[in-house]
Image (cartoon, rainbow, N blue to C red):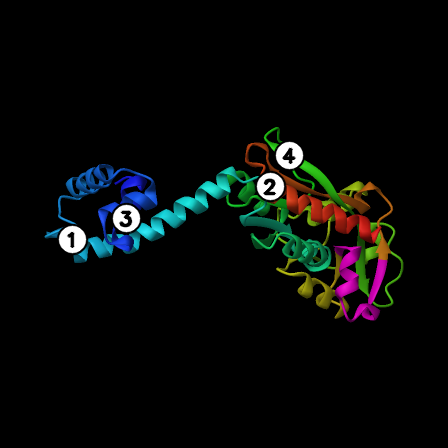
Amino acid sequence: MEISQLKTLIALIETGSITAAAQRLNRVPSAITIRIQQLEDDLGTSLFMREKKCLVATPKAMLLYEYAKKIIELAKEVEHKIKSDQPYGPLRVGALESMAASKLPLPLARLYETYPTIELELITGIRDTLYQSLIDGALDVALIGDAPQNPILGRTLIFDEELIIIAPKGHSPILTPSHTKNATVLVFKEGCSYRDRLLSWYQLFNMTPKRIAEVTSYHTILGGVAAGMGIAIIPKSMLDIFPNRDLLSIHPINTELGRIQIELIWRKELVSANIQALEKCLKSARSATN
């Protein structure tokens, strides 16, 4: 079946005659007849019954008519997406949970408002999982820190994030790992950039945590530290969304490990108007908050 044949079938059923269908499609009547005959030959069945000067659509023709309309609409949609340089359709965004909670609400709201035809899907995770999903094609873009260098990726700086160590309320100042009093370290599983930085901070002083407890969310980390379960590393911006901040003590990391650059990354060969629209909204929101 060809698109032209399906368009001819639709026109013939909706107009009721070969002459009217020819006028709608700007074709001669014989072209309409030929295409319908070709379609019948391809399908091995009659689609119209000839009664005197009228054509009557068979049940199979009506079934094909319903599918043909859907096929034509899908073809138009695909053509629009391929040819258009305007943002349109699905955009799969991967982001660190901290970014999704503290940094993305404003720019994503602006994206929805400015480009209502974008269909956004937001997936959260840790650095390694999001990075691999991007490489495998399961994501269009990812917002992560400490992303591996890869020549196939495009990247742009979005946020410069300060990292801090949090401990229970009243904890004495933490300047080195020895000041943590061998506290349990609450972190995400391996592959998390913040976890890597905290462990690197320990290694900087030739030390390792006495115990590591893996958790699955920042709610657990913040609540656990507030309850006295241990210490953790978090982006400073996460404090703004934690209602019990007074139950925590805040300790800066006075090395280069205390700042992390969050980049928007994408596969260069798959750059699109959607990605460019997201980048624009992210940078605009960043400028508004600086």
Which class describes the residues within 10 Å of circle 4: few (<14), some (14-19), or many (20+)? Answer: some
Disc on the earlier residue, 3 or 1: 3
Residue for badge 3: 20
Residues at marks 1 and 2, CA–CA distance in whole angstroms: 49 Å
Disc on the earlier residue, 1 or 2: 1
Residue for badge 4: 154
- Foreground tag (4 vs 2): 2
Q: Nearer the viewer, residue 171 or 262?
A: 262
At horizontal 85% and vertical 60% (from top left) the residue drawn is 250
Residues at marks 3 and 4, CA–CA distance in whole angstroms: 53 Å
At horizontal 81% and vertical 54% (from top left) the residue drawn is 164
Where residue 215 appears, x then y in whole percent? 63, 60
Q: Amino acid at mark 4?
A: Gly
Do tag 4 and tag 2 residues touch (Cβ < 8 Å)?
A: no
Helix, strand or loop at label 1? It is strand
Q: Amino acid at mark 3?
A: Ala
Where residue 155 appears, x then y in whole percent? 67, 36
Residues at marks 2 and 3, CA–CA distance in whole angstroms: 41 Å
**Span colored in magenta:** 233-250
- Foreground tag (2 vs 3): 3
Residue 54: give its label: 1
Specify whether residue 240 is painted magenta.
yes
Residue 147, compared with residue 179, is above or below; it is above
In the shown orientation, is residue 249 left or right of residue 81?
right
* Total residue callouts: 4
Q: Nearer the viewer, residue 83 or 129?
A: 83
Disc on the earlier residue, 1 or 4: 1
Where residue 272 appears, x then y in whole percent? 58, 39
Disc on the earlier residue, 4 or 2: 4
Where residue 25 appears, x then y in whole percent? 33, 43
Helix, strand or loop at label 3? It is helix
Residues at marks 4 and 2, CA–CA distance in whole angstroms: 14 Å
